[in-house]
């Protein structure tokens, strides 16, 4: 068994254990492999272990990998901050965008998504614990954003994405409460199924609070290589 297979098995075992402890079905938690700064060859090896969903933060790097790995059935997630001038590539090349925090971004993604493509899956990024250095809308803005974005064509509004401050796992419960409160207001509540939170160091706490998607990089790939 190679190191990537072993690492993925260990992460899946941690998800299983966390779900058991929380009284949840492990099939309700998806593993997203955060592959930023790792080369396409490593992603292909991770794909061979059975991993299908990969998350990227840097657009140009991601586009290069998408081109190199186009023969593989990868579900590409963009989890970095979304800039207005980058929306066209995101709309055309990704299945999911996790970092939407303004209506103008959602409108651009919707208009640039081809009508013949599957709807683009969207998560609203929320600055759940008021960090000055973090992107994301305020919790008080989420209900209005949901009402507006859920009306856009070519979009499927799936839920929330949060990145609390390190060691502030109490914020996961706040995110779950917000997620549940907003679901009642969603125009298509059956689509509102994704709470993207938890990473290598805190996925157990995130799952206990109700995460449905954990974004794991270091525990799968090891420490990230430094970018030049």
Image (tube, grey):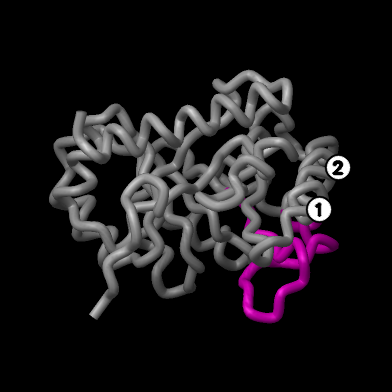
- Is residue 154 found left or right of 23 in the rendered image? left
Note whether 29 is above or below 177 in the view shown. above
Label 1 – label 2 distance at C-alpha: 9 Å
Question: Which residue, given by chain and number where applicable, does mark 2 sit on?
Answer: 181
Q: Which residues are magenta?
A: 123-145
Q: Residue 151: image x %, image y %? A: 67, 46
Q: Residue at x 54, y 43 (%)?
A: 214
- Label 1: few (<14), some or many (≥20) within 10 Å? some
- Is residue 44 found left or right of 194 in the rendered image? left
Note whether 12 is above or below 225 in the view shown. above
Q: Residue 112: image x %, image y %? A: 42, 56
Q: Residue 153: image x %, image y %? A: 56, 45
Q: Residue 118: image x %, image y %? A: 42, 36
| Nearest the eye: 100 or 3 | 3
Tags 1 and 2 touching, CB below 8 Å: yes
Question: Which residue, given by chain and number where applicable, does mark 1 sit on?
Answer: 143
> Does residue 98 show up?
yes
Please identify the quadrant where the N terminus is shown: top left
| Nearest the eye: 51 or 95 | 51
């Amino acid at each position: 068994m190679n190191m990537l297979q072993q690492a993925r098995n260990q992460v899946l075992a941690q998800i299983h254990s966390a779900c058991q402890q929380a009284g949840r079905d492990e099939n309700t938690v998806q593993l997203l492999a955060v592959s930023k700064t790792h080369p396409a060859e490593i992603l292909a090896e991770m794909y061979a272990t059975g991993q299908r969903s990969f998350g990227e933060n840097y657009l140009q790097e991601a586009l290069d990998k998408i081109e190199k790995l186009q023969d593989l059935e990868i579900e590409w997630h963009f989890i970095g901050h979304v800039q207005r001038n980058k929306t066209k590539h995101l709309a055309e090349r990704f299945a999911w965008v996790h970092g939407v925090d303004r209506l103008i971004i959602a409108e651009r993604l919707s208009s640039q998504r081809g009508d013949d493509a599957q709807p683009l899956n969207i998560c609203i990024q929320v600055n759940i614990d008021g960090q000055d250095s973090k992107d994301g809308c305020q919790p008080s803005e989420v209900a209005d954003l949901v009402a507006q974005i859920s009306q856009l064509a070519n979009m499927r509004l799936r839920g929330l994405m949060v990145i609390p401050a390190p060691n502030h796992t109490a914020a996961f419960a706040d995110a779950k409460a917000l997620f549940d409160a907003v679901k009642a207001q969603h125009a298509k509540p059956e689509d509102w199924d994704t709470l993207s939170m938890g990473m290598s160091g805190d996925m157990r706490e995130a799952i206990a609070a109700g995460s449905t998607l954990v974004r794991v990089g270091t525990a799968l790939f090891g420490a990230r290589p430094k970018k030049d």
